Image: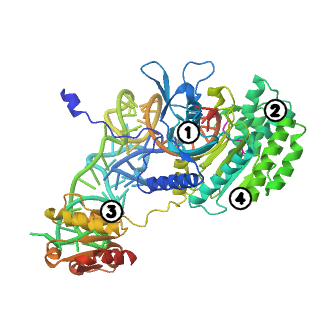
Amino acid sequence: MSKKTKNFRPRARRPKGFEDRYGALANAENALIGAAAGVYHAHGFEPLSTCALEYADCLGKFLPDDDRPNEGVFAFTDDDQQWMALRYDLTAPLARFVAENYDPLPKPLRRFAVGPVWRNEKPGPGRFREFIQVDADTVGAPGPAADAEMIMLAADVMKAAGLANGEYVIRINNRKLLDAVLAGIGVADTDEGAIQRLRVLRAIDKLDRLGADAVAQLLGEGRKDASGDYTKGAGLDARGINAVLAFTQAGRAGLEATLSALDPLMGASDTGKDGMDELRAIAETVQACGYDDGRAMIDPSIVRGLGYYTGPVFEADLRIETKNEKGEPVRFGSAGGGGRYDDLIARFRGQPVPATGFSFGVSRFAAALHALGRLGEEAHGPVVILALEADQMTSYFAMANELRAANIRAEVYMGGSGMKAQMKYADKRNAPAVVIVGEDERASGEVTVKNLNLGKQLSGQIKDNKEWREGRPAQTSGARQALVNMVREALNR
RNA sequence: GCCGCCUUAGCUCAGUUGGUUAGAGCGCCGGUUUGUGGAACCGGAGGUCCUUGGUUCGAGACCAAGAGGCGGUACCA
C-alpha cells in the first residue's frame, strides 16, 4: 500500500438532494407509515413489496425517439447492456407486477406498498431525490366506487396521521372535464393539440403558486418571470383562456353546488358527460359516507401530473400554513395524490385493465409536520441503567428486562466511561430517570432511582457550590424488589 | 437547465476605507465532585476565513473561474 493511499481519508458528505433522517424525523416517518399501512390493511389491502430497480422500459421511462432513459430517473446499464432504473414511484412497478403475475391474482387486486422511490430532479423544501411513498391501489375495478373509496381512505390516513378536521382536504377533479372544455374551444385531437393540452395542464398546475393572471399568460402567449426567464405559453386565444380559467374557478363550497356550476361548461361533449357522471357518482358516495364535511371537495383546478391519469384525479393537501425558521411561508406541495389510470397495465397486456390508486409522499408529509412543530416527539428517552461495576452486567441486564416487561423503555449503559460520563449520557438521551446500583446499593440489597427531570428543576434553585456537591436531589433508594414501582413513580412525577 | 443571493470555529454570526498573533455568544472538553447530568465560577481545545488562480509591498475583505448552499423559474413522464 502506497503512502498516499494509506493517508487517504474520504470526506464524509451526503449526496445532494438525499436526506438523513434521525430521531424525531425518523420517528415521524415511521409513525406516518404505520398510520397509513394500518388504515389500508384494515380495509383489506394486502402488502406488496417490489424491488428498487426495474428495467427502464418497464417504467415507461424512454423518450419516443431516444435510446436512453429519460432524465428524472437514476439509470445505468447492466452487464447485459440493458437499461436499469431506480423506480420513481410505486405505481409503475405495480403495473409490472400485475401484468407479470396476472392469472393467479384475485381481481380486483387490492394492495398497498411502502418504500423509497428516487427522482433525479432539483431538490427543494419538501422535495427530495429519495423519498418514501405509501401507495394503495385497486386494480380491476372500473367503477367510480373504487375512486370514491380511495378518496375516503386518503382522508382516513390524514386523520390517522393526527390531523384534525379542517386541517386537510382531499380535492377531487376529473381529467375528462378539462378535455371536454379544450375540445369545446377548438383544441384539436392531433399531435399538435396534445402538446397544447400538455401546456394547459402545466399552466393550471401553477394556479395556487402564481395566481390567475400569470396562468392566463401561460395559457396565452407566454410569461416572463421575475428572474427574466421566459416560458412559452399554450397559445390559446382570449376566448380559450377565459373558458379554461372559468372552468378552474368553478369550485364552490359544496359538492352539489360545484357540480351545478360545472354542468353548463361541458356543452354537448360526450367526454364531458362521462366525466360529470363519474364525478357525480363519486360525490354521492362521499356524501353518503359523511366525508363532505370539509374533508373532501371538488376542485376543478386540480389536474395532477401529466402521465397516465385517464379520469378522476385527487390530491391531499394540508390546509395549515407552513413557515420556516425565518417565519416565511413555505410551499411544500401536496401530501399525496392519485387517480384513475386505466391504460397503464395495458402497456404490458394489450387489453385495458382499469385501476385507481392513491399515493402519500411520506417524507414530504413528515417534513411538513416537522416544520409545523407537529411531530409528536417522544416525551422522553429510555430509562438508563448505569453500569458502575463491570462484573455486574448480568444484574443490570436483568433490571432492564424487568422494566421492559413493565412496558418501560430501558437500556443498560454500554460505554466504557465513569459515572459522571454516564450521567451526561443519560441527560443527552433525555432519559426520565437513571437506575444507580453500585457497590453500596449492592451491599445493602437496594437500588437508587434518580428522577432527572425533577433534578433539573431543583438545580435551578441551587446557588451554593457546596450544596451542589453534597446534595443528592431527586433520588431515592429502596429495596431491589421495588425497582419497577420506584421507576414508575419517578416517571409519573 | 436558467437567473439572483450567500459561503469566517460544531451552530448562529461580528470582522472598520485592504494593514501585525481572526473574534463573540451558544455548544464541546476539563476543573471546583476520584458515586452523579442539569445551576454557578474558573480554565481549555477547536479555524486551509469554501477551492483555485489573479491584483497588491500586503487579501478574510478586491477581481475571475469553479464547488456547495438558499431562493425564484423550468422540468417532474
Task: State the CA–CA distance, disc 2 to disc 1.
Answer: 35 Å
Q: Are marks 3 and 4 on the same chain?
A: yes
Q: Give the residue pinned by disc 3.
A: A428
Observer-nearest of A344 and B70: A344
Query: Disc 3, disc 4: CB below 8 Å?
Result: no
Q: Earlier in the sequence, mark 2 or mark 3?
A: 2
> Do marks 3 and 1 both belong to one polypeptide chain?
yes
The amino acid marked with disc number 4 is Tyr
Between the C-alphas of marks 3 and 4, the distance is: 45 Å
Residue visible at 37% across and 40% down in the picture? A13
Residue range corresponding to the magenta coloring: A301-305
Mark 2 and mark 1 in contact? Answer it, CB < 8 Å.
Answer: no
The secondary element bearing badge 2 is classed as loop
Quarter the N terminus of chain A occupies: top left
Q: Nearer the viewer, residue A148 or A303?
A: A148
- Image mark 3: chain: A
* Amino acid type for the residue under numbered disc 2: Leu
Q: Which residue is mark 2?
A: A236
Q: Classify residue A74 as left or right of residue A207.
A: left
The three-letter amino acid code for the residue at tag 1 is Leu
Residue A291 shows which numbered tag?
4
Callouts 1 and 4 on one subunit:
yes
- Residue marked by disc 1: A90
Q: Upstream in the sequence, badge 4 or badge 2?
A: 2
Q: Earlier in the sequence, mark 3 or mark 4?
A: 4
Q: Which subunit holds the residue at mark 2? A: A
* Of the image marks 3 and 1, the number of the one nearer the N terminus: 1
| 4 or 2: mark nearer the eye | 4
Task: Look at 77% across and 36% down and name the residue there.
Answer: A219
